[in-house]
Amino acid sequence: TQQLVVTKTISATSCSFLNKVRTLVGQVRRSSVAVQKLLDLTGKKLMTDCPTRWNSSYFMRRRLSEMKISINQVMETLKIDSHRVAEWKELVEWVNLLEPFAEQTNVLQSDAQSLSYIIPSLFELQYHLQEFSQLQPTSQNMLHELQHRFQYILQAHDINFNPLPAVACLQQMALVDSPTRPILPIQLLEENL
């Protein structure tokens, strides 16, 4: 359901920008000369996204932003238009907005994670969205969607509240104090329950 927070917001707000990104990636990937020049400069290829995996859109944007300088060089050499400065800036903002969601998706889909990581993950995403100053309408929509979708875990006053993830966090904190696994402070848990 975390991916639904991202996909719903992205489809509602960034469709035209995402199409610009896909167009640029498609132009480069269709040109064997451009692909070879990029491989020579960076050792990497541009990635395309897959509609069934939201994070593929994130990875496509991240790779494009990482290769910005090389892409601009190649596009200028081939006399093909690239993104404008404002579009490159927006691309970086999108990468920064989506990065914690991609990280949490990666962590939570692992077989090694347990129920105890859900609430800390949600709090981390919630904090990120509250503090994110760029793409303000979009980040606020994502925050609202996150709070709405997970109110049964995050809001103790919700009629469908499920205390099991909170109990799992407390149990995990009692059993494991590892630097590889974030520990949620009890007062933060109490404030949000």
Image (tube, rainbow, N blue to C red):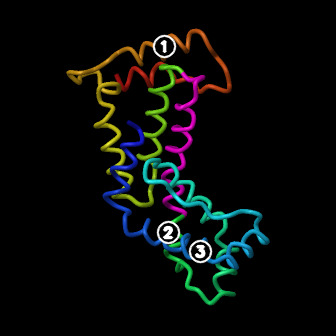
Position of residue 13 measured from the top left corner of the image (x, y, whole percent): 34, 61
Label 2 element class: helix
Tell me if label 1 and label 2 are in contact, CB under 8 Å.
no
* Quadrant in which the C terminus is drawn: top left
Tell me if label 3 and label 1 are in contact, CB under 8 Å.
no
Q: Nearer the viewer, residue 31 or 2?
A: 31
* Residue 34 magenta: no
127 to 185, vertically: above or below? below
Residue 21: image tag: 2
Position of residue 146 measured from the top left corner of the image (x, y, whole percent): 35, 40
Position of residue 1 measured from the top left corner of the image (x, y, whole percent): 38, 36
Label 1 element class: helix
Label 3 element class: helix
User: What amino acid type is highlighted by mark number 3?
Assistant: Arg
What residue is disc 3 on? 30
At a point 41% along the width and 18% down the height, the residue shown is 165
Local crowd at mark 1 within 10 Å, few (<14), some, or many (≥20)? some
Quote the CA–CA distance across marks 2 and 3.
Answer: 14 Å
Say whether residue 136 is left or right of residue 183: left
Say whether residue 150 is left or right of residue 49: left
Q: Magenta stretch: give its range.
A: 92-113
What residue is disc 1 on? 170
Q: Which of 20 and 140 is in front in this view?
A: 20
